Image (cartoon, rainbow, N blue to C red):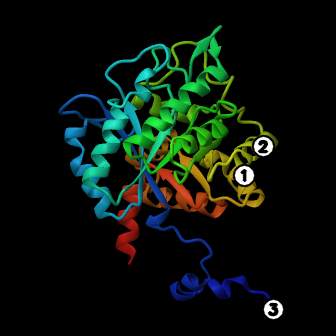
Amino acid sequence: MYNRTRRLRKTQGIRRLVQETKLSIDDFVYPLFIEEGIGIATEISSMPGINRFSLDKINEELDEIVQLNIPAVILFGIPANKDEDGSETWDENGIIQKAIRFIKEHYPTLYVITDVCFCEYTTHGHCGVIHDNDVDNDVTLINIAKQVVSHARAGADMVAPSGMIDGTIQMVREALDNNGFVNLPIMAYSVKYASAFYGPFRDAADSAPSFGDRRTYQMNPSNRDEAIREANFDDQEGADILMVKPALSYLDIIRDLKNDFDRPIACYNVSGEYAMIKAASEKGWIDGDRVMMESLLSMKRAGASIIITYFAKEAAKLLLKKH
Ligand code: PBG
């Protein structure tokens, strides 16, 4: 027999030499939930190991992230007050603006990305301004521009608009450029599906819609061609990084974008994906560490060079142990 593929699997040494995909701590972005108030460090019940922190309680978490050499965090805010339009999102004393200044002052090497959205800040829980029971696209764009400029002024390193509002990337690029932030990159949530996998996040961020759902702006999980169209618009409008979300059920989409676009591809390993592995692992039904590493590896193999994941700290610890 000429062809015996098992020759290259025989020992650990040869398996290491022919390994095609390698996970690295450099790939990870860790999400942080920051809540207005004092003395808060509350574990999210459906996301064991993940907490909502107030700024006075977040040092230990940030120390650990920096010690583990995780390069970046993405920030989500839980404000004290919500309103119809989510106006705290562009307030210079909003929770995210304060968090950015705090992190950049005390942890200057940590790369700070902000999620740009409204759902955690609006009384109705939708990702923009409501008119006639739906998110008004073009009015929302004006508020997105105010929000990104406010994040940039507070010192954010990158902004990541997640609302799936048409024209966002062009609006954000122009707003940043016109305010002197020509070098601030945009990571676009280009392909974001209306997914049931966001369930635990909505508890965590207190952002479930009070009526209806997000299907008039987020994508239908059955659509693959449309993902290319979405990514094309963001690419043309000047997004620096294209993201697919969720990750695990959408590995085909990650690969499509990797093949079609000459931009770094990111994916968001979302809350429900985290919760499933944690729950099964707690029950002893799966080996949680191995399933975690295998699923993160699958995202990288599919084509994502940036992985936003609640597993970042745990995976980093395992990767450090290996060396
Ligand atoms: C919207 C936003 C959501 C997530 C990140 N940004 C939720 C949504 O669209 O309802 C989900 C992240 C996760 O599930 O881990 N601001």
Please state which of residues 90 and 86 is positioned toward the viewer in this rendering.
Answer: 90
In this view, the mark in front (2 or 3)? 2
N-term mark: 2 or 1: 2
Q: Label 3, on which residue?
A: 2
Number of residues whose C-alpha sits closer than 10 Å to that of mark 1, classed few (under 14), some (14–19) or many (20 or more): some
- Give the residue type at disc 2: Arg
Q: In this view, does 236 lie to the left or right of 88?
A: right
Residue 224's disc number: 2
Please state which of residues 320 and 232 is positioned toward the viewer in this rendering.
Answer: 232
How far apart are labels 2 and 1 at the CA level? 8 Å
Secondary structure type for disc 3: loop
Q: Position of residue 109 (x, y in %)?
A: 34, 60
Residue 92's disc number: none
Residue 18 higher or lower than 172, as above or below:
below
| Residue drawn at point x = 42 percent, y = 46 percent | 156
**Can residue 269 be seen from the camera position used here?**
yes
User: Number of callouts in the render?
Assistant: 3
How far apart are labels 2 and 3 at the CA level? 40 Å
Tag 3 and tag 1, C-beta contact below 8 Å: no
Q: Label 1, on which residue?
A: 252
- Give the residue type at disc 1: Asp
